Image (tube, grey):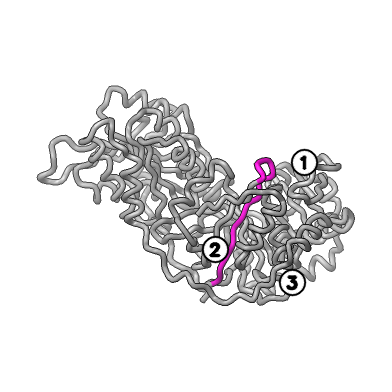
Amino acid sequence: MNQLKSQSFCVNCRMNRRNFIKTGCIASAAVSGLATGAGSLYAGENDEPTKIHVIYSLHDVVQPGPDWPNVGYDFGPVMAKFNSELKARCAGFQFIDSMAKGPEDASAILKADETGDVDGYLVFQMNCWNRVVQTIAESGKPVLYADYPFAGSGGFLTYSAGFIRQNKKNAGFVSSSKIEDLTEAVQCFAKAKKAGPSFDFAAAVQQTRVAGTPKAGGLSCLEDHLKTASIDECVKRLKESKILAVRDQNSGPAEPIFGIPMENVSFAEVNQAWERADKDESREIAARWRKNATEVIDVSDETLVTSAAMYLGMKDVLKKHGANAITINCLGGFYGGHIHAYPCLGFHELNNEALVGACECDLRSTASMLTANMLTKGRPGYISDPVIDTSKRQIIYAHCVASNKAFGPEGKTNPFTIMTHSEDRQGASVRSILPLGYLTTSIQINQPTKEILFHQGKAAANDPDDRACRTKLAVEPLGDIEKLFTEWDQWGWHRVTVYGDLKEPIFALADRMGYTIVEEA
């Protein structure tokens, strides 16, 4: 049941970068040229091909630092593969291509194209947050916006939702691991060229996207003997809980969130607790992790021991403050030299124990995890950076921290592998092979607007792609996958997923707390 599924498009493609990077800048020195030359026309095609400028939105050909998909990732073969596939599959089109890091590069490209005859733009989001597509979309020409899954997905989802909210008719998007879905959407450029400025390019692309999305599969789920807490009990236990927020070197009281008491704790306090952790106990925990893991990949015994010490330090801090949840600005603390071990394995262990360890000092997600924990009497929430793949009709929840006790401390365990943290290939984190066939509930709490975001899905696969975060639970959503594209610009990227049917209790809890449910599927 828990088998790893197939790789997505172009994961294993390889090509000589020297053959790929042939020409200089297309727009200016700020625009790194990656032109492979204009696509040749096939015999019998129109003498006036549809000319498309392909723009890769990313930091550099070889990724210089930690970010999705990971440090050192070579985009050269990927871009070359996309270029060759587009030319081979899209007769009657002519392609030129460039790289752009941000708005300045995008503006330079548009300026250089003013004297040309470009009919539209295909923008690939290769890293998450490079803001290129916004500038290109302001050109007024048709723009096809494509995600490179597990690489640019955060920005892609957020920026696409923004286009939907703006009713940006010249900007359509593709979120698929199938090259056929991309090239089918490219055909909309020819339709737009023929129809003129009044053509609704976004609607045409959506039509191809919907046509390429499989119909819902069998959505009946395996039996789950979940017994939820009463709403009164849940509210009482939330008020008796406490979240510790470790964001910087500040400490002291903080405003409650969703009725849950909060307290700020400094990096220094956590780091001191890590330093005090019992060395023998740390080694015992590290040995247990190594024994219980299916495999330990590229993680040393020393790193396991320091991770175990961080787990013991966090437990000590939780006990000292009378708290049951902790969330840490982990990358900021580690890269800033304020903490000296990743908390990922410690979070994994805390979540297995019906406590809460949450990434990135994300208070909304921590409150969501704690709420799910209380409603389910101990089941762990799984915080994630989602990716949507319409070709499989899936939303994939990706992160480097996950429990391997999805049904709570007394429930069955699932296999897990210990690996480095994916973005920087350092420290230790977890790839959890989560149970399949069960119903999952995903939520996010937003206190300022008094809303709870909600969707459900059937656990369908564990995606093994090496790009981006280690654990990747793929779920087939219940409802409309197209609607799932609409809220990311308002809610941010994170979602919290828990095993079980929590629809009735979440709706009842929202009613009790005076919150509104936003169903995103």
Q: Is residue 479 left or right of residue 199?
A: right
Q: Residue furthest right?
A: 320
Residue 442 on the magenta segment: yes
Q: Is residue 464 left or right of residue 350?
A: left
User: Where does label 3 land, which residue?
Assistant: 287
Amino acid residing under circle 2: Leu
Q: Nearer the viewer, mark 2 or mark 3?
A: 2
Residue 355: image quadrant is: bottom right
Amino acid residing under circle 1: Asp
**Vertical comparison of 288 with 466: above or below:** below
Q: For residue 248, which numbered disc appears in the image?
A: 1
The picture places residue 37, in percent across and down from the top left corner, at 27, 38
Residue 204: image quadrant is: top left
The picture places residue 62, in percent across and down from the top left corner, at 48, 44
**Vertical comparison of 161 with 517: above or below:** above
Q: Are marks 2 and 1 in contact (CB under 8 Å)?
A: no
Task: Please tell me which residue lies in front, 323 or 350.
Answer: 323
